[in-house]
Image: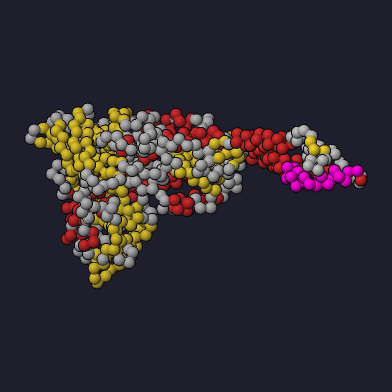
Amino acid sequence: MSFLQPWLLWGLPLIALPLIIHLINQRRFQTIQWAAMMFLLAAHRMARGYSRLRQWLIMAFRMLAIAGLLFAVARPLASGWLGLAAGGHADTTIVLLDRSPSMQQRGAGTGDSKLETGKKQLVQTLQTLGSTRWVLIDSTNHEPHEVESPTALINLPTTGPASSAADLPLMLQSAHDYIRDNRSGRTEIWICSDLRENDWAAESSRWATLRDAFLEFPQGVRFHLLAYSQLPPTNTSIRVTEVKRQVTSEGAELLISLKVAREGPDDQKIQVPVEFDIEGARSVLTVELTGPVTELKDHRIPLERTQERGWGRVSIPADANPADDDFYFAFDHPPRRKTIIIAEEAQIERPLQLAAAIPPEPSLACDAEVIGREQLSTVDWDQIALVLWQGLLPTGADAGLLQAFVERGGQAVFLPPRTPGDEQLFGVRWNEWTSSNESIPIETWRGDEDLLGRTLSGAALPVGQLEVRQFCRLSGEHTSLATLKGGATLLARVPSKNGGVYFWGTTPALRDSSMATGGVVLYAFVQRALSAGVVVLGKARQIDAGDPRGETPSSWSTVAEGDQGLSTESSYHRGVYRANDRLLAVNRPAAEDEARVVGVPRVAELFRGLNFVRVDDSAGSLSSLIQEIWRIFLVMMLISLIVEAALCLPKQGRGLSPSGQTTQPARAPGAAA
């Protein structure tokens, strides 16, 4: 139990007031020995036990009545799950609202989603607790802005559903900066989230930094987590993996590959109707689900020969989460996949050129041009998808060109020079070479994602079959995608806001590795890098919500929108948008389809040392998190006064005792003799 007016509890010593009055009242009388009263005293002693018990009961109920009054005016709170220790109104209340697609999951038998339920619970709770200032930080723009009252959370456009993922560490960092910059007093932070792993990034080092930063505030910060971690018993999601337009003898057709995934029991076959909508032309295909994931490859939809570009949507019937029941796409002529190669050794240059120039499909056009460093300034970078660089890392103006290329969304792959120098690019640099008389085995590689991931059929790339004879070590901040025995990095990805930056620890030269003779891994890697780089070149682009990839959302116009939101938030809502002559299909990130939740112990560890309370709720819940119970104490006070009055009533009538003595009506406790 907690209280909205806890300072009134300082009056609890007043409970002893009846006892003090009783003691003072007893000292008003003096005892005088009088022989005529001997028989009356003897009769009184016979009833002394009952009289003393009645006096103590009267005293107890008087004290209980005062206690009930004090507790009632202090406005006590009760909560089923929430052990609040309110301690009065907060100076600042900050709400961190997760608007990600997974928060649109609906409760069984109710129409409210996790997001809607969370907002209603927050409004009811915060109105009861009160605050001097309310601040909202939502999961799209991460910027704090003040609201007039908690009720604004219900109807604000910036609290509605969105298709972008959340970044809880970034939201907490924004809350910390607000408290620091505004020198807020007593602050409470309410987090409304469903604890998805991709949104919380629980393994990130940012959590430890944030925890230490909040502990430094002298005024103290209290955290309340309103958790909706319950997963749906059943849910189906759909995602388009590839869209291609190709010309046929009868006109043209669209080849659509998609993936249908489901949560819940997967030991039974179910049939799901998939609707294809190509700019208003609809068709339905029934897909049979035989496991947790079912993939459909190159489903053909006829097109008019004149329809060279356009957009579409695939959807499935509504279920527990409507946010993952559709997926938008755009199509156009595929742009040419252009690669430039800079290499200091001819035997490395040729394998790279072959891997980049041979298209994986006849409908794709690939160009690979070998140039010298002096030609970099003449390159038309707006037409380049991939840069393959083997040699000393560029510096000065050349480094600036490559950094701008990556920032635009291009892909850059670096291979080590024969004689490493002191140059540094993207925060990393080459070190010394290490060689071995025998092949160095590859110990681990990331086969679940990135450029070494499995194929669409689920087959793994033969990375483990590569023979590495010598490698160059890498220093700096990077993520290892493949490592050699002993822990040395074979392939690394360097963090970048846009585009992709990769460093191989060896080269295709025969004395270095079998990358050229094996060929499969090198070819798959280069073509996947080209596919990622060409995305920003085409006039039809697939974009993850919240990551515009160099586009300017303020200039977008809506073609088809799945979520109704502010025009300034177009990049956070699924749909199709037009940007000049480009069609942009915006959808939820792939990580949002992974139903993994941060466990209770891990959450407790993230907030270790902080004043933290967790509340578990469910979508559609009608139970209040907290409620005032002062009426209960008022009723308790009234009952105490009634019982005390009944005990104070004197006995009625006169009569003779069995011994023949006259009995007198009993006096109220504390009355004068």
As drawn, 586 above or below 476: above
Q: Main secondary structure of the magenta part?
A: helix
Q: Is residue 571 left or right of residue 666?
A: left
Return the residue nearer the eye: 21 or 579. Answer: 21
Decide whether residue 47 is among the magenta residues: yes
Return the residue nearer the eye: 478 or 457. Answer: 457
Measured as percent of width and height from the top left, residue 11 is found at 70, 40
Q: Is residue 246 left or right of residue 433?
A: left
- Magenta-highlighted residues: 36-55
Q: Is residue 228 left or right of residue 559?
A: right
User: In which quadrant of the rendered image does the C terminus lie?
Assistant: top right
Measured as percent of width and height from the top left, residue 158 is found at 43, 33
Residue plotted at (10% across, 36% down): 248
Measured as percent of width and height from the top left, residue 621 is found at 43, 37
Residue plotted at (36% across, 55% down): 478
Residue plotted at (22% across, 27% down): 280
Residue plotted at (36% across, 37% down): 108
Measured as percent of width and height from the top left, residue 58 is found at 72, 40
Snapshot quadrant of residue 327: top left
Decide whether residue 548 is among the magenta residues: no
Q: Is residue 295 left or right of residue 7?
A: left
Note whether residue 156 is visible. Answer: yes
Note whether residue 385 is visible. Answer: no
